[in-house]
Amino acid sequence: MGALQRPPFGGPLLVSARSRLVVAAVAILLLWIAVLWASLSEPARKAAATPASPVAHALHLVVASGQAAPGGGRFNRFDVGSQPIVAPVNNRGQVAFYASVARAKVAEGIFLATASGIAKAAAVGDAVPGGGVLSEFARHPLPALNDAGKVAFGATIAGARATEGIFLAADGRLKAIALSGSDAPGVPNGTFLEFDAPALNNRDQIVFIGTVRRGRETLQVLYLYSDGVLRKLVAGGDPTPRGGTFDRFGLPAINNKGAVAFPAVIERGALLGGIFVVGTSELRLVVGAGEIGPGGAMLVRFSERAAIDDDDNVAFVAHLGSNAASEALVVANAAGLTQLAVTGETAPGGGRFSAFGPWPNFGPSAAIAFVAAVDDGPGPLGIYFGNPGAIRRVAMVGDRLPDGGILPAFALNSVTSAGANGGLTFATMANPEDGQNGIYYYGPPGS
């Protein structure tokens, strides 16, 4: 018999054992590779799964009286008489404001504050297209601002046939939208006489109330400027959807779709007044005086201005019942009326709401910004922001500022403006006796 052939590496049992060792070694190696891969990928997985931290909001002073103004002199005041100070803010954190200037050739102007400084949008003495110069902003110093940094405003004119106008300032240029003495579109034999403050959206559409002379009578007319064309939306004497005719109008607001919300007083109708929407659809009544609000009280009259967002939510202040001190912040939409806040209820951060500012404003996601007076709270006036059931206090008179100072008293008839980035602005009066005041911004850093 021939010799037994041996396997090259030993007998069958040894081969089996070695095979098992090799398999085990490979398995262990694969296990360590898996562990190492997991340890390396875990931080990346966690980073991807963890949402980015929200941008920190901060409160800072935009401008104050005594501060150097562009072109010389120093800022003096940001208000005129008892009119509200309105400093609109856009999605980049830019803030537009009116100011008078001391010790300078330019007595007053409209300015734009950005992250890089403050620039003039328009000032007294600037040339008006078609002749004359801007002579005064004080009658209605309520600028409007869009996300492109364009500013709309009303001003009086000297040295020309026109005495007033509505203007759009952008990139150092001034454009006349409507001038007094010119023909009033949509009103036969009508000419513009004077104007109220305009509102502006991101499509450069401008809406305003113009007083029009027609023969021996004057009437108010709501106008929309869009794509270079000025057209009448509603005029005094026009019929309302619920009977009667329009008499007088409050200040209009416009959203980025072109829908316009406005309060109006009605003559010879079942309603004494209401808030209406027009522009993107047929004229419709949103809410009328005499309706019952969501809290069960009658809505007697409304704020001089309503706010409207891009989803056609309309926010306003309503006076309730026969009690002149009873007010509510109300939101109206296709679903009906919702009460955001009412006097007497607990205010976030302490105290009870006792009154609301002249009108509210919309921020992102239908959140509403408003000023409210507070009884039995940590301060007399506060800035609040939020949706129904989720309101928070942003700032209050007496709050500690980042520089260690104290937030001064709010300006008379305070209004807070809101931007699409969640930023808010409001004005303060540090010393009512000498008129020192400032404008503050709360929100993400501007660009």
Image (cartoon, rainbow, N blue to C red):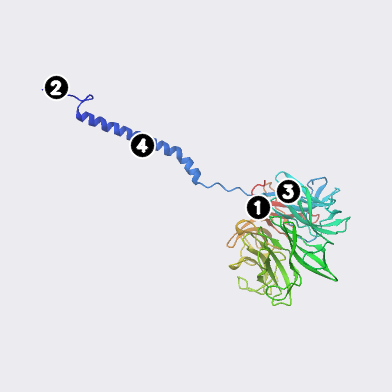
> Gap in Å between the C-alphas at discs 1 and 2?
95 Å
Give the answer, above or below, for where 83 lies relative to 1: below
Horizontal arrangement in the rendering, residue 435 relative to residue 159 (left or right): left
First along the sequence among labels 2 and 4: 2
Whether pointer 1 and pointer 4 mark residues with C-beta atoms closer than 8 Å, the reply is: no
Which residue corresponds to mark 1? 423
Element at badge 3? strand
Which residue corresponds to mark 3? 113
Which residue corresponds to mark 4? 31
> Gap in Å between the C-alphas at discs 3 and 1?
14 Å
Q: Quadrant of the N terminus?
A: top left
First along the sequence among labels 3 and 1: 3
Element at badge 4? helix
Residue 192 pos. (x, y %)? 82, 63
Which residue corresponds to mark 2? 3
Res. 221 image quadrant: bottom right
Residue 297 pos. (x, y %)? 63, 73
110 or 324: nearer the eye?
110
Few, some or many C-alpha atoms within 10 Å of disc 4 (few <14, some 14-19, many ≥20)?
Answer: few
Residue 379 at least partly seen: no
> Gap in Å between the C-alphas at discs 3 and 4?
61 Å
Whether pointer 2 and pointer 4 mark residues with C-beta atoms closer than 8 Å, the reply is: no
The amino acid pointed to by label 2 is: Ala
Give the answer, above or below, for where 387 lies relative to 115: below
User: Which mark is nearer the camera, 2 or 3?
Assistant: 2
Few, some or many C-alpha atoms within 10 Å of disc 3 (few <14, some 14-19, many ≥20)?
Answer: many
Whether pointer 3 and pointer 1 mark residues with C-beta atoms closer than 8 Å, the reply is: no
First along the sequence among labels 1 and 4: 4
The amino acid pointed to by label 1 is: Gly
Residue at 74% across, 77% down: 268
